[in-house]
Image (cartoon, rainbow, N blue to C red):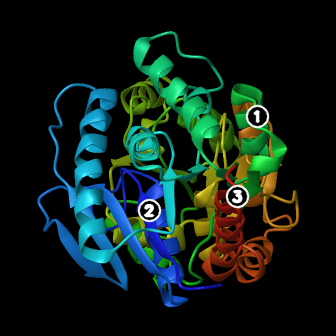
Amino acid sequence: MIKLRIGMFSWESLHSVKVGGVAPHVSELSEVLASKGHEVHIFTRNRGLEPHALINGVHYHRVDHDQSDGVVQQMDRMCDSMYWMFLEIVDRFGQFDILHGHDWHPVNVLCKLKAEKGLSFLLTYHSTEWGRNGNVHGNWWEAKTISHREWLAGYESTEVIITSEVLKKEVQFLYHIPDHKISLVPNGIFLDKIRKDVDPGEVKKRFGIHPLAPVVLFIGRMSYQKGPDMLVKAIGKVLSHRWDAQFVLIGEGEMRAHCEYLARSMGVKHVSHFLGYASDEVSRDWYNAADIVCVPSRNEPFGIVVLEAWDAGKTVVATDAVKLIDNFKNGVTVYQNPDSIAWGINYMLDGLGKAGFGEEGRRLIEEVYNWNEVADSTLKVYDKALKDNEQGR
């Protein structure tokens, strides 16, 4: 393939504002595309940084905008700023071959560039508003507006990338995007990004946990979608089986206060450690120090946390919302209720089949879920989009 000039549009990245799993996807995919000889520019939000930077071979263009009001209004202003920044960058670097948006946040700027400048785009769905709300249609105006933009992105884009089969079914159920427009390209991870030599006992002691106590780790948004409340409700049944088990929950979100209330009211606060937002290094320490990583999601479009746990060689206990797990081969799949989650954790604490689950997951990273494979698959979609453009689709 010829050298491409690629514009990535995302509300988050590793080197601007980081919110969740889209940030590593955008930055790390861009780095690998750049390493393959392509010129990659990321248009993203700013937070007190220089507007332009070249990081790991990728051009970052960070836009400032008014961050008052709700997320929809903020994204409107972000898109306005991105539009003018993009035109400035075109003047400096030349026309772009590919415009690639991520989720609903940059849809307005991409549609405006299509309408006013004749520039087509493709879009990656990382999740949907329906899924983020726990498989429920939101009836408030923000949810309706976001859902409309998700539909608009699928309608206006030349090609659509979706990260998993389960998310593809969800997107098609919601927005009726035809099969011929969709390509499945999974998320990826750099091997050994998470794995680290740590003394698990020392990490546990830093947080007041006995060095020999088994630790179950939750890491992610404290939201209904991610199911932390179901894990907290499972703790009592785990303690009745293994009295010394401890639970570390990393993340912020609207359910944190409720989960802490549940822990107090159910008498398990003494073994529940709510760390809130944690730095990458603290999170990495816990991935490597924990005995089990639990993913109790009600909806999981992909599950980057599973890749991160596998990279650390850890066993994963996940609900059936997570489709990455091959049950009893690289993890344990349970039902979406506290009793089943407790059963899965107890099963693994007993050590039945524990050895090798995480290492089997690492093998999948080496063969499937690595950025080199993901980048090559993405380039095939770019080639398809360019051919679509030539044919005037």
* Left-right relation of 106 to 183: left
Mark nearer the N terminus (3 vs 1): 1
Judged from the image, the secondary structure of the residue bearing numbered disc 1 is: helix
| 238 to 23, vertically: above or below | above
Q: Which residue is mark 1?
A: 172
User: In percent of the image, x 75 and y 57: which residue is there?
Assistant: 184
Judged from the image, the secondary structure of the residue bearing numbered disc 2 is: strand
- Residue type of the residue flagged with mark 1: Gln
Q: Nearer the viewer, residue 84 or 207?
A: 84
| 254 to 363, vertically: above or below | above
User: In percent of the image, x 36 and y 28: which residue is there?
Assistant: 257
- Residue type of the residue flagged with mark 3: Asp
Tally of marks = 3
Mark nearer the N terminus (1 vs 2): 2
User: In percent of the image, x 48 and y 33: which residue is there?
Assistant: 223
Q: Which residue is mark 2?
A: 8
Picture coordinates of residue 341, whole percent (x, y): 72, 40
Using a 10 Å C-alpha cutoff, classify the residue at mark 2 as few (fewer than 14 neighbours), some (14 to 19) or many (20 or more): many
Using a 10 Å C-alpha cutoff, classify the residue at mark 1 as few (fewer than 14 neighbours), some (14 to 19) or many (20 or more): some
Please indicate, yes or no, whether residue 21 appears anywhere in the rendered image. no
Contact between marks 1 and 2 (CB within 8 A): the answer is no
Using a 10 Å C-alpha cutoff, classify the residue at mark 3 as few (fewer than 14 neighbours), some (14 to 19) or many (20 or more): some
Q: CA distance from mark 2 to mark 3?
A: 19 Å
- Residue type of the residue flagged with mark 2: Met
Tell me the mark number nearer the camera, choosing from 3 and 1.
Answer: 3
User: In percent of the image, x 66 and y 50: which residue is there?
Assistant: 160
Q: CA distance from mark 3 to mark 1?
A: 21 Å
Q: Which residue is mark 3?
A: 388
